[in-house]
Amino acid sequence: MDPWANICTSYEQVGQAFVSHYYSVFDTDRSQLGPLYKDDISMLNFEHSPQRPGQFKGTVAILQKLQSLQFQQVKHEVVTIDCQPSPGGGVVVMVCGNLHIDAEQNPQKFSQVFQLLPTSSGSFYIFNDIFRLNVG
């Protein structure tokens, strides 16, 4: 079976719309991100390394991690979005931007990669989510 036979031709629009929705929900009430993930399938790497494990699988574990973050207010300022189609009708999205956290004067740089896969109802869910602060 040709993996490229089922390509999402509107991958750019899907990626742009997803990013707008995801960060709007995250910045308003991150406890409401659950429907964007899929139970027992989705994975999040959050600042993951061998020295500091940060890998979470399934909607419950992902939401627990996101809700445990130690800030009251956050605003994602997206600087760049790169989108590409992936086999099976999926979309890979890479985001770079600035995090404005609480009353901090200087935003933190971040990058985040999503792999979105189609659902049977025609929408998408987050299969992979990789978040990293850009420090150094």
Image (cartoon, rainbow, N blue to C red):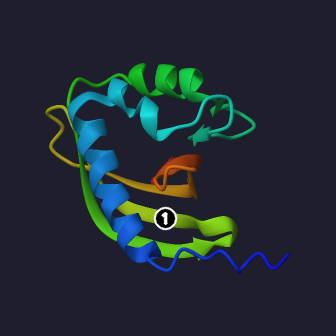
Q: Could you say which quadrant of the image residue 59 lies in? A: top right
Q: Residue at x 24, y 38 (%)?
A: 27
Residue that mark 1 sits on: 93
Q: From the viewer's perspective, is 35 left or right of 105?
A: right
Q: Give x and y (percent) for residue 68.
A: 42, 19
Element under label 1?
A: strand
Label 1 amino acid? Val
Q: From the viewer's perspective, is 52 left or right of 99?
A: right
Q: Is residue 65 above or below residue 42?
A: above
Q: Residue at x 47, y 55 (%)?
A: 112
Q: Could you say which quadrant of the image residue 30 lies in? A: top left
Q: Give x and y (percent) for residue 32.
A: 34, 28
Q: From the viewer's perspective, is 8 left or right of 27?
A: right
Q: Give x and y (percent) for residue 35.
A: 44, 34
Q: Residue at x 68, y 37 (%)?
A: 41
Res 129 visible: no
Q: From the viewer's perspective, is 53 left or right of 106?
A: right
Question: In front: 81, or 109?
Answer: 81
Q: Is residue 116 above or below residue 22?
A: below
Seen as rendered, the residue at the extreme right is 1
Q: Could you say which quadrant of the image residue 44 lies in? A: top right
Q: Quadrant of the N terminus?
A: bottom right
Res 110 visible: yes
- Mark 1 is surrounded, within 10 Å at the Cα level, by few (under 14), some (14 to 19) or many (20 or more) other residues, namely many
Number of marks drawn: 1
Q: Is residue 87 above or below residue 17?
A: below
Q: Residue at x 28, y 61 (%)?
A: 78
